[in-house]
Amino acid sequence: MIALVIDFVVCFVIYAAFFFGNPWASTIIFFGEQVVLIALTGSGFGHVLLGLRVVKVDGTYAGWWRPIIRTFFLILTVPPLIWDSDQRGLHDVFAGTVLVRR
């Protein structure tokens, strides 16, 4: 949750500086930041600061489509609030990803 708050703060700063008043800008910025950074580095800003990364369930590189699915469901808000028996949010379950320590 702390990593998510950090990512929201970073996105809000960009939104406030350049796109304030556009109702969809903050969501698009968050989506872009999450997809690009997770696909390229395995981590968003908050993940990096907390020493976390997103990988496939088998521990390998998540690729491009998994971060897209994961972030889409993360934006919907409800899936991250529901966990499975492994303590993974539904956004991770649907994307086939898991959050691990670096």
Image (spheres, helix red, strand yellow):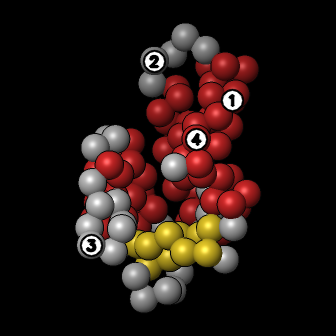
Q: Which tag is nearer the camera, tag 2 or tag 4?
A: 4
- Report crowding for label 4: few under 14, some 14 to 19, many 20 or more residues within 10 A (C-alpha): few
Q: CA distance from mark 3 to mark 1?
A: 36 Å
**Which amino acid does the dot numbered 2 rest on?**
Pro
| Residue position marked by numbered label 3 in the rendering | 85
Element under disc 3: loop
| Residue position marked by numbered label 1 in the rendering | 14
Seen from the viewer's position, the closer of residues 66 and 83 is 83
Q: CA distance from mark 1 to mark 2?
A: 14 Å
| Residue position marked by numbered label 2 in the rendering | 23
Q: Are marks 2 and 4 in contact (CB under 8 Å)?
A: no
Q: CA distance from mark 4 to mark 1?
A: 14 Å
* Residue 32 in view here: no
Q: Are marks 4 and 3 in contact (CB under 8 Å)?
A: no
* Residue 2 in view here: yes
Q: Position of residue 64 (x, y in %)?
A: 47, 67
Element under disc 1: helix
| Residue position marked by numbered label 4 in the rendering | 5
Q: Which tag is nearer the camera, tag 3 or tag 2?
A: 3
Q: Residue at x 41, y 72 (%)?
A: 97
Q: Which tag is nearer the camera, tag 3 or tag 1?
A: 3
Q: CA distance from mark 2 to mark 4?
A: 19 Å
Q: Is residue 62 above or below residue 50?
A: below
Q: Is residue 57 above or below residue 25?
A: below
Seen from the viewer's position, the closer of residues 8 and 69 is 8
Task: Point out the tag, 2 or 4, that comes first from the N-terminus.
Answer: 4
Q: Is residue 22 above or below residue 97?
A: above
**Which amino acid does the dot numbered 3 rest on?**
Ser
Q: Which picture quadrant has residue 19?
A: top right
Q: Is residue 21 above or below residue 13?
A: above
Q: Are marks 1 and 2 in contact (CB under 8 Å)?
A: no
Q: Residue at x 49, y 86 (%)?
A: 59
